[in-house]
Image (cartoon, helix red, strand yellow):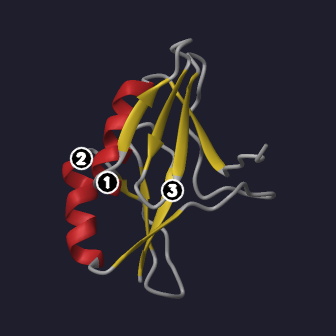
Amino acid sequence: MTDSRALLLVLDSREPEQLAQFYAALLGGAEIQVQPDLTHLRVVQPQGVQLLIRRNEQMVPPVWPQTGATGPEVRLAVADVDAAEREIISLGGQPLDIESEDSTRTFADPEGHPFALVEW
């Protein structure tokens, strides 16, 4: 018997259906899988990346930039940063005013989770 393993990134959300739609569109070609208990939605990209969006009615948007200890950093690598920025904004993402030493641009998804856009 083979041991199946996957690395999942989990985001809490008050509106997991809407957040799943945002990331599925942003990742292009991603499939949304609804878990039987309706507490999680899984966004699966063809390359195997999995984002699990967990329903949490008490979720409070993160404050960014964080002070002190930070959590994991989410980065989306793209070939055309300008085109990706336009798409993120059209899907409901918001640019965050954060200075970067490289060409990284930081955004918040519709529920406030920060992520960075980098040229690949």
- Quarter that holds the N terminus: top right
The reply to whether callout 2 and callout 3 are in contact (CB within 8 Å) is no
Q: Indicate the amino acid at tag 2.
A: Leu
Label 3: state its secondary structure: loop
Q: Closer to us: mark 1 or mark 2? A: 1
Up/down of 51 relative to 74, above or below? above
Residue at (42, 53) in percent of width and height: 45
Residue bearing mark 2: 91
- Foreground mark, 2 or 3? 3
Q: Is residue 2 left or right of residue 30?
A: right
Separation of marks 1 and 2 at Cα, in angstroms: 8 Å
Q: CA distance from mark 3 to mark 1?
A: 15 Å
Q: Is residue 116 left or right of residue 64?
A: left
Residue with the mark numbered 1: 26
Q: Which residue is mark 3?
A: 48
Question: Who comes first in sequence, dot 3 or dot 1?
Answer: 1
